[in-house]
Image: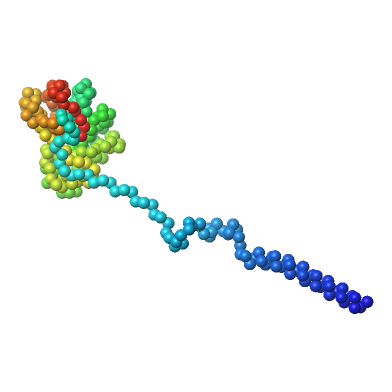
Amino acid sequence: MRFQAVVAALSILVCGALIWNVASAGRWSQAAAGPRAADAPKEIQAPLRPPGNPNAQEPATPPAAPALPVDPTLVSKVKGEGKVVALTLDDGPWPEWTDKALALLARYDVKATFCMVGQQAKDHPALVRKVVAGGHGLCNHSMTHDTALKTKSPDEIRAQMQGTLDAIHAASPGTPVPWFRAPGGNWSDEVRQTAASLGMRSMHWTVDTNDWQKPGVGKMLEAVDKQLGPRGIILCHDGGGDRTQTIAMLDRLIPDLKAAGYTFIVP
């Protein structure tokens, strides 16, 4: 009996040891595998990388394409074929005369380029908007119409141009101003290069009506007749004082040029 009791006790001990080993093996094998990726703190989980070089850097955002440079060459003729012509009006916007010029242009269905003085644009923003609403082009004509602009320092030249751009855009945000015209036509390399750096080409003229001298309508028409050819640019004024003669001249010139086969364009 004592022998049988000893054998039974040993059997119980062996079975218990086997059961403990099986349970322990399952528990410790899971621990040995380490924590599951899903259970790891989010901030320390490694991001997935595509196959390839594990040390490769993330691609950088490609830089924006550089703006195309503006040609600083002085322009005295418009692009196009045959009898195309550009009409430009300087020194405005000017109360009364800009309005009269706009009314006349609308009557003949002609678009022009208005070369605006910055101080005038600042003082008469409603006229700037009226020119833009009429579908006309804009040109920067300096802030104060300083005819000695080319003799000024680079900073002063830039300030004259930038001030005009600011005045125009304050009145009509986002409106393009693709051209600059030097007061008095007094150009220099510095003036043209500065205009180009601000996104503007430099526009001169081929026909000077001399309307600012008020020589009479006949004399102005005679000047146009002598100087105008295909792709010409006509200079006259809607600002700077009384422009009665200019408006009367345009009232005759526009229909005459149309009858001669000319087409008015905005450069």
Residue 243 placement (x, y as % from top left): 14, 26
- Nearer to us in this view, 13 or 161: 13
Q: Residue at x 22, y 44 (%)?
A: 70
Where 223 falls versus 27 (above or below)? above
Could you tell whether 133 is left or right of 75 in the image? right
- Nearer to us in this view, 62 or 117: 62
Q: Residue at x 16, y 43 (%)?
A: 73
- How many dots with numbers? 0
Q: Residue at x 84, y 75 (%)?
A: 10
Q: Determine if residue 85 is in view.
A: no
Could you tell whether 139 is left or right of 228 in the image? right
Q: Residue at x 17, y 32 (%)?
A: 81
Question: Which quadrant of the figure contains the C terminus?
Answer: top left
- Nearer to us in this view, 49 or 217: 49
Where 118 falls versus 27 (above or below)? above
Question: Which quadrant of the figure contains the N terminus?
Answer: bottom right
Residue 257 placement (x, y as % from top left): 14, 24
Q: Quadrant of residue 124?
A: top left
Residue 215 placement (x, y as % from top left): 6, 27
Could you tell whether 78 is left or right of 4 in the image? left
Where 37 falls versus 89 (above or below)? below
